[in-house]
Amino acid sequence: MNPRRRRQLGIQKGDIDMTKFTKGIDRRTTLKGMGLAAAGALLPASLATPASAQAAGRVVVGTWGGDYARLLNKNIEEPFLKSKGFEVVQDQASDAPRRAKMVAERRLPRGTTDIQGLSAAQMFEMNAAGLAEPIDYSKLKNAGNIIPIAKYPYGIGHIISGKVVVYNPKLVTPAPTSYKDAFDPKYGNKLGFIDIQYQYVMLAAGLAAAGDMTALEKGKELLLAAKRGGARIYPTNEAFAQALKTEEISIGLMWKARAVQWQNAGITVDSVAPVEGTMAYISGFMIPKNAPNKAGAYAYMDAMLEKSAQEAFAVDMGYAPTVTNAVVAADLMKRIGFTEEENKKMKDLDYAFLAKNDAAMKEWWDKVFKA
């Protein structure tokens, strides 16, 4: 560049002459670059800068749909997360495809969800597959309130209920007291089982027969005796409920929380915690190892453990809280919870045993018991 032109542009001696670096770049190339920059500016932030969208507080929650998803939004997301600027996105699907997606994404440095809602057995399964982030309880201000049975190295229980004996008090007298009563052939075709709950039915039979959930062979004897007596098998929880409503059956096994929901719907049904000890049902959340926003996942876990969130789920869904500081009205707690003595006898499942034996259990159930 000549000295006169340098003076016009205000370029001092010793400054870098950028024209040397742009020589050869024609007008078409320059305009093309400007066009790309403009197009990038028009892209949604989630597409233009995916990493920054996550870092800004976007939390993707894998969960079942229906009432549970609605109540997560009502009792957790709106009051505790969205109000603080988090963007919460629910990835709704049944647990099987969500677990399959986690397995498919295992080699990715960043998965598509930050936190996953699963049963305790399914959380165990994902941890055994190497997909769960170990929980750092020091990151949770509400960690000290969690009841021991809901506290896992790889996940946290959000709601808890138990497998109880349900019965129609008009048709079953005296009232049952044990799991063994729920397999008694004397009830004939008034006794019902639920197909999709084969695992829990077989474990309950083991407890009834030998005081041990793993005593599958002893439990099978009880089941076959009930079958010979005329016991019915229903495909789903809803079909079982309908049979109770019409009095086609009068006794069986179900989660206490679901029995409360049926009572609220006008079905004549009571429940009893079995003397053998109630098998726990725990549903909660885990963090995938490759979750993009782990800080957001911890914020979600802390929100679900908030006293008022837990109390709201007890009212709305009939599940007992998993934190000790939640206060539930005595009449409601009597319906959804368990006495101090019953809580002491509550039994968490042996998830390692269940994972190892599930295939054989399903095969026997389908080919022998249902045949």
Image (cartoon, rainbow, N blue to C red):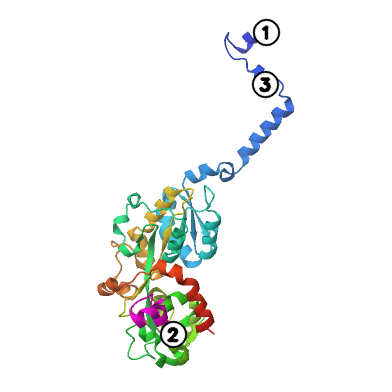
Residue drawn at (41%, 65%) of the image? 120
Q: State the quadrant of the C terminus.
A: bottom right
- The stretch in magenta equals 203-220
Q: State the quadrant of the N terminus.
A: top right
The amino acid pointed to by label 2 is Leu
Earlier residue among tags 2 and 3: 3
Q: Residue furthest left?
A: 341
Q: How many marks?
A: 3
113 part of magenta stretch: no
- Residue at mark 2 to residue at mark 1: CA–CA distance: 100 Å
For mark 3, what is the residue? 22
Q: Nearer the viewer, mark 2 or mark 1?
A: 2
For mark 2, what is the residue? 223
Q: Residue 345: percent from the left, percent from the top?
A: 29, 73
Secondary structure mostly seen in the magenta stretch: helix
Earlier residue among tags 3 and 1: 1
For mark 1, what is the residue? 2
The amino acid pointed to by label 1 is Asn
Q: Residue 18: percent from the left, percent from the top?
A: 63, 18
Q: Nearer the viewer, mark 3 or mark 1?
A: 3
Pick the front one: 100 or 221: 221
Relative to 149, is 12 above or below? above
The amino acid pointed to by label 3 is Thr
Pick the front one: 143 or 134: 134
Quarter-of-image position of residue 244: bottom left
Pick the front one: 180 or 247: 180
Relative to 256, is 111 above or below? above
